[in-house]
Amino acid sequence: MTDALPLLIEIGTEELPPTSLTTLERAFGQLIGEALLIEGFEHDGLQTFATPRRLAIVINSIATTQPDQAIERRGPAVTAAYDQAGQATKALAGFARSCGVPADTPFETITSDKGAWVVYRATTPGLTLAERLGAILEEALKQLPIARRMRWRDLSAEFVRPVRWLAVMIGAEVVPIELFGCTASNQSQGHRFMGRGAFEIRSPLEYASQLSEHFVMANRLDRQKMIWTALMAKAESLGGVIPENDALLDEVTALVEWPTVLAGHFDERFLRVPSEVLVSAMREHQRYFHLVDEAGQLLPVFLTVANVDSPKPEIVIKGNERVITPRLTDAEFFYDKDLKRPPAEWLESLKQVTYQAELGSYFEKAERLGSLSALIARRMGIDEASAQRAGQLAKTDLVSGMVGEFPDLQGVMGEYYARAAGEASTVSLAIREHYQPRFAGDALPTGEVSQVVALADRLDALVGLFGINQPPTGSKDPFALRRQAIGVVRICVESQLPISPFTLVDDAVAGFAREFDGQPVKDYLTDRFEQWAIDEGVPYDAVRAILARTDDAPLFASAYADMKTLADFKAEPTAEALISVQKRINNLLTKVTEDEVGHIEPALFEHPSEQAVIGLATTLNETKGLPLSNRLAELGQGLSAIEDYFDNVLVMSEDAALRINRVSTLKMLRDAVNQIADLSLLETAA
């Protein structure tokens, strides 16, 4: 690149939302980098920076001028551009005006086999980076993924947080872009407390090092690595282990510009409270990291990442210890208070908690869950009484004091309280595990009763909300029904459950006092199953071919296994020929009406292949219980009979009786094959 210089763009803001910082940084870099290349400003790649108070990019070398732009515009036909005297017509004059040149300009012509036209050719000098950068930056900022934009002062501009300064430099020169009420300069800000106010950036290439001099680690990934290294070192010095928590580490990294890791302690008496409670109090409320010993037991120690290198760290530590103690005291109080009542006594309180206005209270949902869980358990040969009890008690901790204070502990506290009340271990475990999986990749319920209640909970939600016409839409899913449906799919497939979710949908429908149609829920589950299988890496054509089978109560576990088998089958020697044959059969059958399909008369067979095809179809129908690989092998062995049939039998015979017989034979074969899979939906290499 000729005339290349370094570039800096920095947007200084009020504290950015920590959970969005990584996304904002990546999008900012991608949008700016791509826009510069589209505009013709070649560069050697960019580096992004993100702290709580800034988003920035630095490009070490970027072209400062666009390439010259060649312009070619075709005008009117030559016959329309000039009159008989060779003078410009109104058509040519209008074209000339649109090109910004006089009508008597000597235009060039282009000729093809369709005629000749005038053409305007010119070269426009490329614009400079300084001239285009403002528009590029403004457009990129509009496209940032910001959920809720803010306005401040009397400005009409909107951004994720109020903008306080703007620095834009090409080499040592400032580009005085105006955005968000700020005029760009070469001034930046250091650390809010440790820095010395505004300072002058000498060069884009010195941006990061100068910020470091003013107590700002601008590189987010370097800052994150430094924090994690310091956390592990501090944990080791205290004889503990710090469990990995990527989400918390990301959030803390987005909260500090000059991180310092400090350790604090809390009273050991709090360790009698369930560790999940203490961890939640430290993590969710204070963003502390907890420590465990080699056995995984919680230690009365926490680590915090301060945003200041204090000369008196003991004061900072004492302040953090003073803040966490009331939180843990509250948790201890709620725990002791909740233990005074067994979960069964909380059922009545669920009447005061609305599940959904049209579907009633959580008490009504608990009643449905108990009944539905017992029914599912009976179908699966699992202890009905335990399943019913677990379903009834699954939501009782929603009215506990602890869950009211720590909502993320629902299910977890329910298990503790159920065990303390003497409930069976399977029941207690199900109260915790029925919420699983909570998110993509989350663990599934491990216990059989847990699986039953997890299915019951999700199917009750799906049937009820679809029933009152509250399905998820493209932008809204307040009850997380997509996640609930994926949970049903994963539990059925990954736990290899020998029961169809369609059967369970019908069971859930029966549990409501109102009449609901379960078919939309079945269709929705099928859609989620299809997308989940594709996301798991199964080719979409194999997924569609299996789902096309006529089955009123499909087993998702076996269907998923069949999808993978069918995907492997496409590599078999006979696969392409069988797919082609099935498509040929479908094409023939689309040309016939119902009147042309009837009872097959063997007496009308004129060639041995007709009986062979009937025999193949019969065999396929009689082997429905065999694994798909066996049935595909059986079909492959019958390929020669099918090909012989098409070589020697005229299906669309002029004799009506023969035509009906032969069409019916092909329909019988197609239907038998479609019970294996709709092979016509498979794609071939050709």
Image (cartoon, rainbow, N blue to C red):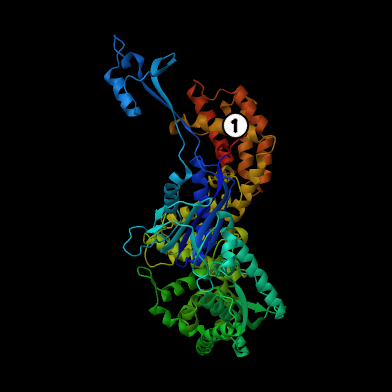
Q: Is residue 144 visible?
A: yes
Residue at far top of view: 84
Judged left or right of residue 548, residue 685 is right
Q: Whole-percent x and y of residue 661?
A: 53, 29
Of the pair 25 and 669, the residue shown nearer to us: 25
* Mark 1 neighbour class, 10 Å CA radius: few under 14, some 14 to 19, many 20 or more: some
Of the pair 24 and 387, the residue shown nearer to us: 24
From the viewer's perspective, is residue 440 above or below residue 651? below
Judged left or right of residue 418, residue 182 is left
Residue at far left of view: 90
Q: Amino acid at mark 1?
A: Ser
From the viewer's perspective, is residue 24 above or below residue 647? below
Name the residue that disc number 1 marks: 580
Asked which secondary structure carries label 1, the reply is: helix
Q: Whole-percent x and y of residue 423?
A: 57, 82
Q: Whole-percent x and y of residue 581?
A: 59, 31
The quarter holding residue 513 reads bottom left
Q: Whole-percent x and y of residue 455?
A: 53, 65
The quarter holding residue 674 reads top right
Residue shown at 48% from the left, 24% from the top? 656
From the viewer's perspective, is residue 191 above or below residue 87? below
Residue shown at 68% from the left, 45% from the top? 629
- Quadrant for the C terminus in the image: top right
- Quadrant for the N terminus in the image: top right
Q: Is residue 555 visible?
A: no
